[in-house]
Amino acid sequence: MVPATEAGAPSAAGFELEAGLADVLTLDRRRAAGGGDEQAMFLDTVAEYQWARDVAGLAPSTLERLVGPVLEVCEHFEVVPWRLTARDVDRYFAGPGRRSTSTVRRKLNAIDGYFVFLEQRYAGELARRFDVRVESPVDRFNRPRHRGDFGLRVPPSRRAMREFFASWRAWLPQARKPLVACRDYVMAKIAYVSGVRAAELCAVRLADVHWEAGQWGRFVVQGKGARGSGPRQRMAYLFADGRSLLWWYVEEVRGLFPDDVEHPDAPLWPSERLSPVAASLGIDGPGLALAPGTFGRALKAAGERFLPPPGGALFPHLLRHACATHNYEAGMSLWEVQKLLGHEWTTTTVRYLATAHADPEQAALAASDRAVQRLQGNTGRLQ
């Protein structure tokens, strides 16, 4: 037989040579096309960043939102991204680019994500061609707490969550405001069981709970829209644990808040205050729904107090990741987890399961057992 290298397959040295020639040819093509300047290089990297994220399964509208903030800031200062500084980013989002906190956070995450791509794929080429060091202008001082989808959100284990909720529940009678403490506890447990987002959960009304739906009851949430479609209603699941806990909350706790629980707009999770209109008129009315930020702060404080070591920051969206991961590890299929979370795209659900502990050998044995059971069932029917 002819050795692989003699049959046309390149050796290790040949691969290195080909990779070097590929770099030279790429640079030559860029220069021949008038792309030897930094602006042309910038456009090349933006296009390739979009291609890379497209391969990862992101929707077209999401791809536009990823690169839009980068183009926006660079156009304002008339520079390429690797010439931006942290001071430039601060000046822009404190001035002409000032928007709501959530919008600024999203744009900073998008800019930071693009620089992760530059660091991983183009740091060497940019250093050789333009003598620049690729460094994100979104530094540790202006960077949002969570670094886009390149970061890995590691939820607490199933055992840690059990210990967390058990410790929190045991503490409730000692709380300075037992009513508020019970509301926060039940709200966090329902968020973990159902996997709904904080904003979705806070907007739920008492009338949105349908005890008769499904096996254990469900509740309506205004789900996050996809492809710019706006909010989409969907049914969230309570399961057995969630149903018993929520029933106790509605029967024993919810009616103690000062608002009118019979009002059709009465929130499931009220704040301690009445609506301004009802308060000014001195009449009963629906309470104000708890704000997602308030819920987040309560959950963070509970995590710092009751989450067993190694602990870590606990925030509402991490409960959603924990719900997905723990249900998947318990045997729920990917499609069922996708339905539970209300995702349109399976690729979105997969990112929630990055830390799931999968056992391919056990899965293969289970699949074999199911095949045998089906075969036996078919044989029995033929007889």
Image (cartoon, rainbow, N blue to C red):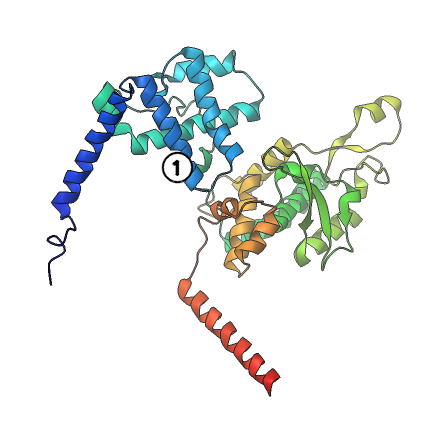
Nearest the viewer among 24 and 155 is: 24
Residue 220 place in picture, x, y as percent: 72, 45
Above or below residue 249? Residue 80 is above
Above or below residue 47? Residue 352 is below
Residue 262 place in picture, x, y as percent: 86, 40
Q: Quadrant of the N terminus?
A: bottom left
**Is residue 48 something that shows in the picture?**
yes
In the picture of the structure, the residue carrying the numbered disc 1 is 52
Q: Quadrant of residue 268?
A: top right
- Mark 1 residue type: Ala
**Is residue 151 something that shows in the picture?**
no
Above or below residue 262? Residue 43 is above
Residue 323 place in picture, x, y as percent: 56, 50
The answer to whether 13 appears left or right of 47 in the picture is left
The answer to whether 8 appears left or right of 134 in the picture is left
Residue 316 place in picture, x, y as percent: 58, 40
The answer to whether 14 appears left or right of 316 in the picture is left
